[in-house]
Image: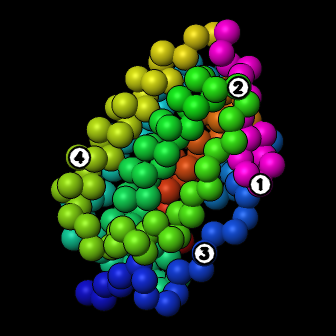
Amino acid sequence: MTTHTPDEPGIVPETKSWTWVLEHPCPDCGLDTAQVAFRALPDAIREVAAAWPAVLERADVRKRPDPQTWSPLEYAAHVRDVFRIFDVRLRLVLDEDDPTFANWDQDATAVEERYGEQDPRVVSAELTEAAATLAAAFEEVPDDALGRTARRSDGARFTTETLGRYFIHDPIHHLWDVTRVEA
């Protein structure tokens, strides 16, 4: 089996803004975030997190399907970190007036944290824990906080509600990335 580390040439850094998922269904994974109710987010987080441990038990967990695509382990480590980042971002939008989120370079993090070399069992436990924390945080959001605003440094603006709908696409899409069957 061929394995790759995240610092090997091949992975093209992500440069597109995925905020379009707030307006259009994803043509790949099929998720229509406009149909995701804010109050459904905690269950959606728990459901997607529950699917990742099986992925992390696969024999091919470290294998990249091609040099330009992360392995299931790398995707899982990324999803774990997405749960963590969005927990911070959710708390910021709730605690501060119109905060600007710090940049997060997911590709640099993958290299620095050596996603492809992490222990799949540890990633599984950490992903599950981070998902539970974030699901609980979304459950605690009061109705009168759904319109609070925040922005990314690139100017993209979110309310608490759109931040949640934007976020949920990432773990669902990446689960699709590692479970889809090529025709």
Q: Residue 103 versus residue 122: which sits nearer the camera?
A: 103
**As rendered, which of 6 and 39 lies closer to the eye?**
6
Left-right relation of 113 to 13: left
Q: Where, by quadrant of the figure, is residue 13 drawn? A: bottom right
Q: CA distance from mark 1 to mark 3?
A: 17 Å
Q: Distance from label 1 to label 4 (Cα)?
A: 33 Å
Q: Residue at x 26, y 51 (%)?
A: 124
Q: Which mark is residue 146?
A: none
Give me the residue at 41% from left, 23% from top.
136
Q: Residues within 10 Å of mark 2 (few under 14, many from 20)?
A: few
Amino acid type of the residue that numbered disc 1 sits on in the rendered structure: Asp
Q: Is residue 153 magenta?
A: yes
The residue under label 1 is 154
Residue where numbered disc 3 is placed: 13
Q: Are marks 1 and 3 in contact (CB under 8 Å)?
A: no
State the SS at label 2: loop
- Which residue sits at x=36%, y=68%? 113
Residues tagged 2 and 1 counted as in contact (Cβ below 8 A): no
Amino acid type indicated by mark 2: Asp
What stretch of residues is rendered in magenta? 144-157
Residue 130 % position (x, y): 35, 40
Q: Indicate the position of residue 87 as horizontal and vertical percent values.
A: 48, 36
> Does residue 20 appear in this view?
no
- Mark 3 or 2: in front is 2
**In this orientation, which residue lies closer to the viewer: 167 or 36?**
167
Contact flag, marks 3 and 2 (Cβ < 8 Å): no
Mark with earlier residue (3, 2): 3
Point out the frontmost of discs 1 and 3: 1
Q: How far, Cα to Cα, is label 3 from label 2?
A: 31 Å
- Residue 9 % position (x, y): 49, 90
